[in-house]
Amino acid sequence: MRSRTLRKNKNFKYLVAMALFFILLGIPSYIWTKKNVTTLAGRYNSPMTPIIMIPGSSASANRFDNLVKTINSKYGEHHSLLKMTVHLDDSISYTGKIRANDTQPFIVVGFDNNKDGYSNIQKQVQWFNIAFNAIKKRYRFNTFNAFGHSNGGLIWTIFLEKYFDDSTMTLNQLLTVGTPYNFEEKNSSNRTQMLNDLIKARDKIPKNLTYYSIAGTQLYTDDGIVPLGSVDAGKYIYEGQIKHYTLVTLTGSKAQHSDMIASNQFINIFHQYIIGNGVTNPDSPDSKQSAIANN
Amino acid sequence: MNIDFQNKFEKNLIHLALKFQKLLIYRIIQKTLLLVFPFALFGSFIRIIQTVVIGKEGFLTDVFPTINNDFLNRQIENICAGLYNLSLGFISVMAIFGAAKYTAKHFKRDDQLAGVTGISFYLIVDYSYSKLQPFSFHPQILGLRGLLFAMISGIFIGWIFKKASRPIPISESEQNIWQRSFISVRPIVISLLVAIVLSTLINITYYAEAPGNFINAVASEYSSKSNLGQISKTLIFSVYTLVMSFLGWSGTYSSLGVEKMDKLSTINLNYALDHHTAWNAPNPFTSSSLYHAFATFGGTGAVLGLIIAILIISQDKDYQTVARWSIIPSLFNISSGLMTGIPILFNVIFLIPFILAPLANMLMAALAIQLHLMPPSVYPVPVGTPGPLTAFVGTNGSWQALGFSILAIVISTLIYIPFVKMAIKVKQLDDLTSEEGEH
């Protein structure tokens, strides 16, 4: 009975007007939410490009404190520093924090078990993957630059081969210092198990990567710990696989394996390739902008 | 007048309502609400402009690109702020006038003076002892939030007039206006003294943490892992909000959806952006996916269903007028006009559907989400998005969500229909709106 009288009901027109109103607003709402969600997903491509650093064996997440301090004071920049330590039980502890609006923060990932040796390094890669996923989720970036000191470079390489998914994440530049791709072997024809494994899985490494490998030498052959030949063996992994592979040999004072990251040459290279994203001029609009934003 | 009842429940509820209507306090409250209705309605229209049209995250600002004229925008904003703050934002002051006046009139005291005393009383109570601004008030209590307090205070003032002065002689004319004033001097002085005491107390306790803050903190911080915990939390705070709104206060959840997003909703949003879909979001039963998306059609209490119910079945002219006028603000979830015009506030009959309709909608939505018939709303929704479109926008345009929104309108309308019938019967038996012959 109601439906029959409804048409005669003089309020029928109000109900129709209401329905029309919803339909009329529904269309732009639909367009808006589609667009908004796309931009939100785009914001996921957040302006943040962190510099993720892995120290070498026997070093903790505090290894790069001085490096960050030097960079900040030398270039007048204000990168914040977040340090993470992954514990044996896969839990993560954080020290320091990333300041809001910092587009190029440093994130250092250290491990409770920071011992040398292939099996330890493989474990460290698993821990690093846990940490990487945690920060990916937390800071929602999708490009980053990477730095590895010594074995840290091995962790990066294994990580890129085993865990890294380059469809959702872009690694722009990788920089390593004294990374022993062939451990202590001077002669690259004596390949260690690890080097063989790394070469076998090389095609998983993202093709658009630019990689700078720094080797220090004292007396032409090694940096006091890692032989030049071992660092140079990285070419068997990277050459021909990635966009650019560059090997830099650093000599002079502070070319020793552990001292290198305090050397002026290294800091220049680091700033130029990792922070400046390959832009040579430190006064590029990019760095200026970040300096202004951070002041 | 002969009224036949459809069932026992209806009979009992109507009798209960009639009993309540016999109470002086109840009558005065209902009459006062009708007195302030025009201002509430006017204020709700202004509110649309403020939040939906020119507000920063308002629906129309977001969905339609606007004139980006800052000067013009600011002028409109200022004008609207003035109009709103002194209509709907000033409604408690008007309410105390009405309540004091009606009470005094009932006791045959000087009703005009009682009303004016009420205004003075309320403004003194609300006066803020601030060194920064020499003449200012706590704005929250002037608006809808203070309504209950204002009406009770008004009745209290009317009662003081009854106790402290003698009846106004009716037959005498204006030349005795002096005499009339002097009759009322005592209650005026007493009222203002009470006001000063209250004012001091309020200013002392004002900056202390109110219980409301505590509940809001719990609502936004406490988060449960299990789905059952989530859904019960959302339901409990929804009921709290509904009961509070029924009393004229505001609860945890705003019908405009502007409260801070809780942690769970943020996790949901991140998940959805990660996976490019809202399906299977980790926290399906948050306040945004249930309460905001399905329980606030037309404003708190799903009153869009009430409007439709009135338009369809009510033959009562007054209800129809109020409903028609309330359509536009209600489309943007602003219901203050309807709340005071029907009135829903403090109305025994409408208490049940006011809580039941949103709850039914939320349970329906929870069931649909649980059965994977629709995704939960996780994406941001602009302020004042029309209720039935909230879930649609919040799911990034899921047609299933739109379908369930339409179902929710139907459910809330069906729930309101029997209560509208009852309210009309009550009105026929004992009409509060007609000026009764004074007793």
Image (cartoon, rainbow, N blue to C red):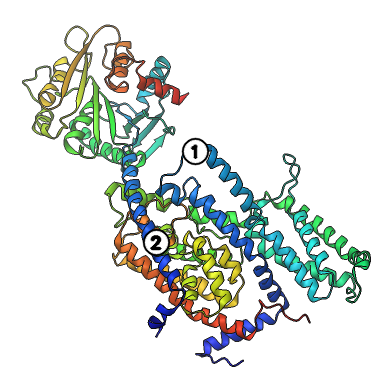
Closest to the observer, B216 or B47:
B47
The label shown at residue A233 is none
Image x and y of residue B237, in percent = 50, 63
B157 left or right, relative to A104: right
Labels 1, 2: front one? 1
Closest to the observer, A132 or B173:
B173
Closest to the observer, A135 or B55:
B55
Question: Label 1 amino acid?
Answer: Asn
Please report, as a chain letter, where disc 1 is located. Answer: B
**Residue holding disc 1:** B69
Residue visible at 15% across and 30% down?
Answer: A207
Residue B76, image quadrant = top right
User: Relative to residue B358, is residue A176 depicted above or below?
Assistant: above
Residue B193, image quadrant = bottom right
Q: CA distance from mark 1 to mark 2?
A: 28 Å
Location of the C terminus of chain B (image quadrant): bottom right
Are discs 1 and 2 both within one chain? no
Does the residue at mark 1 contact the one at mark 2 (Cβ under 8 Å)?
no
Question: Label 2 amino acid?
Answer: Phe
User: Relative to residue B29, is residue B264 depicted above or below?
Assistant: above
Residue A91 visible to the viewer? no
| Circle 1: element type | loop
User: Relative to residue B91, is residue A248 depicted above or below?
Assistant: above
**Residue holding disc 2:** A22
Residue visible at 12% across and 21% down?
Answer: A235
A88 left or right, relative to B1: left
Image x and y of residue A114, in percent = 28, 31
Residue B36, image quadrant = bottom right
How many badges with numbers are in the image?
2
